[in-house]
Amino acid sequence: MTRATTSAVNGTASRATDGGPDGGPGGGLGGGPGGAAGGSLRAADAEACASRGYEIQQLAARVARCADRADAALSRLVRLELQTWQSPAGRAYRTSLSLHAAGLRRARNMLEDAVPAVLRHAQNAMLSAGRPGP
């Protein structure tokens, strides 16, 4: 029988296999024709998929927070860039800030683009709980 567990400490899910419906090795998704083990296996798989979906949603939230932090850092870089630098060293520093800001802007855009993709993946993981296995 397969069971899904969720760790309260780090929020991860794991699957453990206890063996087939008779307690021996093997098992499988079917659990035999019309057997009760098949229903409990599917329920455990559905629970594991839902748990994975929740974890993926948490990942999407972390990616969104990273994008927000990158945006905040970018605004600080832009403020520094807008300062008037008179010396050659100051102008070189401003040029360096511009290059770093451009890279950070690209990274922020990629993070913002990743959030909807991660959320779609979470939705697909939760929907797969209702689908029969191969």
Image (cartoon, helix red, strand yellow):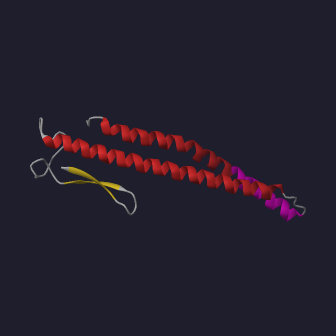
Q: Which residues are magenta?
A: 87-102
Identify which residue, 22 or 94, lies in the foreground.
22
Please give the name of the residue rendered at 80% of the width and 56% of the height, measured from the top-left corner: 81
Please give the name of the residue rendered at 67% of the width and 49% of the height, measured from the top-left corner: 105
Task: From the top left corner, tell me how far across and down residue 39 is, in percent.
Answer: 19, 40
Majority secondary structure of magenta residues: helix
Q: Quadrant of residue 7?
A: bottom left
Up-down: is 131 above or below 14? above
Please give the name of the residue rendered at 37% of the width and 48% of the height, measured from the top-left corner: 52
Identify which residue, 15 or 104, lies in the foreground.
15
Please give the name of the residue rendered at 34% of the width and 38% of the height, measured from the top-left corner: 128
Task: From the top left corner, tell me how far across and down residue 75 is, in percent.
Answer: 73, 54
Is 133 colored magenta in this rendering?
Answer: no
Task: From the top left corner, tell me how far across and down residue 111 is, in percent.
Answer: 58, 47
Up-down: is 7 above or below 53? below
Residue found farthest to the right:
86
Task: From the top left corner, tell me how far across and down residue 83 is, in percent.
Answer: 84, 58
Q: Quadrant of residue 42?
A: top left
Quadrant into which the C terminus falls: top left
Is 43 left, or right, of 72 in this rendering?
A: left
Up-down: is 117 above or below 108? above
Is 121 left, or right, of 100 in this rendering?
A: left
How many badges with numbers are in the image? 0
Identify which residue, 25 or 89, lies in the foreground.
25
Is 16 left, or right, of 100 in this rendering?
A: left
